[in-house]
Amino acid sequence: MWTVIHVAQNSEEKDKIYNALTEQGLLVKVRQIGKGKNGQGIFEILVPQSEVDDACIILTSITY
């Protein structure tokens, strides 16, 4: 089962998180769920439930 671990507010944030997770060998899905105020997309970032703990550790190490 896939679990949402983050909602990115733009494609730059999505790309940064996607790249960080995949570089560490995690499986990642991205799903656009809408458009933000600036006209850019809003994206859900999902990982398999078994990788949620690892993904959260990686997310906390990313500086925005």
Image (cartoon, rainbow, N blue to C red):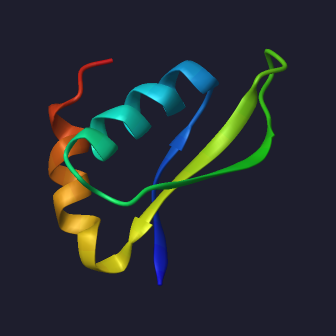
| Residue 27 vs residue 47, the one in the foreground | 27
- Residue 51 appears left or right of 47: left
38 relative to 35, above or below: above
Q: Point out residue 45 in the picture as x, y percentages from the top left corner.
A: 51, 51
- Residue at (44% x, 56% y) in the render: 28
Q: How many marks?
A: 0
| Residue 34 vs residue 20, the one in the foreground | 20
Q: Point out residue 14 in the picture as x, y percentages from the top left corner.
A: 52, 32
Q: Point out residue 56 in the picture as x, y percentages from the top left corner.
A: 23, 53
| Residue 7 vs residue 54, the one in the foreground | 54
- Residue 23 appears left or right of 3: left
- Residue at (79% x, 15% y) in the render: 38
The quarter of the image holding the C terminus is: top left
* Identity of the residue furthest to the bottom in this view: 1
20 relative to 32, above or below: above
- Residue 46 appears left or right of 9: left
- Residue at (75% x, 31% y) in the render: 41
> Looking at the rendering, which quadrant does residue 17 occupy?
top left
- Residue at (69% x, 37% y) in the render: 42
